Amino acid sequence: MAVGVFDLFSIGIGPSSSHTVGPMRAAAVFAEELRASGDLGKVAGLRVDLYGSLAATGHGHGTMTAILLGLEGYHPEKILPAEVEERLAAIAETGTLQLAGAGAGAGAGVPLPYGVKDMVLRPLTILPRHTNGMTFTVTDAGGEVLHQATFFSVGGGFIVREGEEEAALKELDESKKELPLPFRTAAELLKHCRSKGLSIGEIMFVNERASRSEEEIREGLLHIYSVMEECVAVSLKREGLLPGGLKVRRRAPDWHERLLKENRGQDPAYRDPKYWQEWVNLIALAVNEENASGGRVVTAPTNGAAGIIPAVLYYALHFAPGMDQATRQDRDDVVVKFLLAAAAVGVLYKEQASISGAEVGCQGEVGSASSMAAAGLAEVMGGTPQQVENAAEIAMEHNLGLTCDPIGGLVQIPCIERNAIAAAKAINAAKMALWGDGTHRVSLDEVIVTMRETGKDMSSKYKETAMGGLAVNVVEC
């Protein structure tokens, strides 16, 4: 299907969309296929091979445990954090996996002695399609293969099955023909805006209505934002150190308490404009601290960049002109408008380049999210389509070349702070664009192509392998 707003904004668990959400989704698909084949009862052996970046940073990203949950039939958008903890504790205690079990919604599954240590890691083997490759194989008592499949986690929780790449592209092209206003480039998007007299977000809305009702789109987007808000609320109640051994301390709860004190007796809902950047930083940190601990987040468009859009949207709802007098209806309208415009720009990155840190570096994750957020903010602040496109271009232009080199393979340093910095960049990009008339020398399409080519040229050690940059120059403990 054509990439839509609910593909770019999907609910999952941390810490990584490409290394946690995607692998869990692939494993769940494999488990469902196995159950549907009728061969589940014959299974006596299981093998999981992880390649490239999945193998290199899988332990820090929770890849292996996510796959175990997927093999039990759980999907990232449905499983709750409490269920994650319960099932992983049971697997660790018993050493037994319930293949295609309760998570698949049909019986207890087949118990197999299998755990994280049994997975085969091949960090130096890169499969042709993508560095995030994984192969699932099940055999019977005689060692005969019953079912086997290879998947690639290509960023943002999206997965592609080996051998179906061309078919998937063909299906994508065919599904686009069903859209009223299809676009692959910013130039095509702006052309639609001019011919129809619509904003960028409205073009995205027209296309979404090809598969959903107006009410479903609105309710779905407001639900997405409610999950973002809940993610922040949960994070602000959790103190202490993040998991993983780096001993990174959660900062969001303390920062929140300090900001509330600055209200100086004002209404708790009051936000002093003087501290707008501190509030933006707080939201970005809170989301990504929750993501780093494996909490429930919204891919926006990835987990590693999940804090940027909520932080910039928070700015729009609390610090944009006139929002202090806005009704609930007005605020809901802002959320819907913001997310639609941001998604339209996200489609451009997904179509023309990549949102996978393992494929193009962090410019594909944080850079794309910053660009999307800048577009969303410019849209709700009254920007023309040309100004919105300019805002997105400015934000990405100043994230080009951003490497993905997390220390210890954990989505913590530099990822958490990087979200806050990128949110501020997005806000500044939107403001710069709105002070112009929409004309600019470098187009968004040119910047997206540059990002893609930069990613191709970037050394693999800077693309989510934990083999370069901060990952090797900073002692883990």
Image (cartoon, helix red, strand yellow):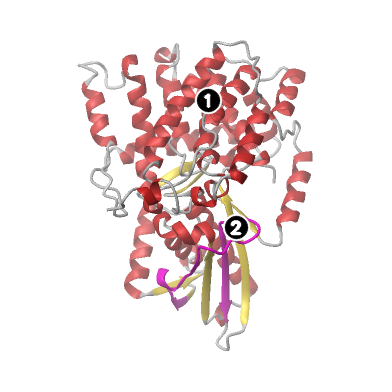
Q: Nearer the viewer, residue 340 or 129?
A: 129
Q: Is residue 290 above or below residue 438?
A: below
Total label count? 2
Q: Position of residue 164 (x, y in %)?
A: 71, 59
Give the vertical position of 138 relative to 65 (above or below): below
**Residue 255 falls in which quadrant of the image?**
top left
Q: Is 162 situated above or below 235?
A: below
> Of helix, strand and loop, which one carries label 1?
helix
Q: Earlier in the sequence, mark 2 or mark 1?
A: 2
Q: Provide residue 432's location: percent of width, then percent of height.
A: 52, 15
Residue at point 77%, 19% (across, down): 195
Residue 443 to residue 354: above or below = above
* CA neighbours of label 2 inside 10 A, class few (<14), some (14 to 19), many (20+): many
Outermost residue, bottom direction?
A: 142
Residue 35 is marked as none
Residue 152 numbered tag: 2
Range of residues picked out in magenta = 111-139
Q: Mark 1 points at which residue?
A: 374
Camera-side residue of 67 and 440: 440
Q: How far apart are marks 2 and 1 (CA)?
A: 30 Å
Magenta span includes 120 = yes
Asked if one can make out residue 205 in the rendered structure from this viewpoint, the answer is no
Instruction: Give the amino acid at mark 1.
Output: Ala
Q: Is residue 169 toward the left or the right of residue 295 in the image?
A: right
Residue 214 or residue 88, whichever sits in front: 88
Q: In what element is the residue under mark 2?
A: strand
Question: Could you tell me which residue is drawn at 58 percent across and 85 percent down?
Answer: 143
The reply to whether residue 212 is visible in this rendering is yes
Residue under the image location 44 percent in, 73 percent down: 118
Q: Which amino acid is tagged 2?
A: Phe
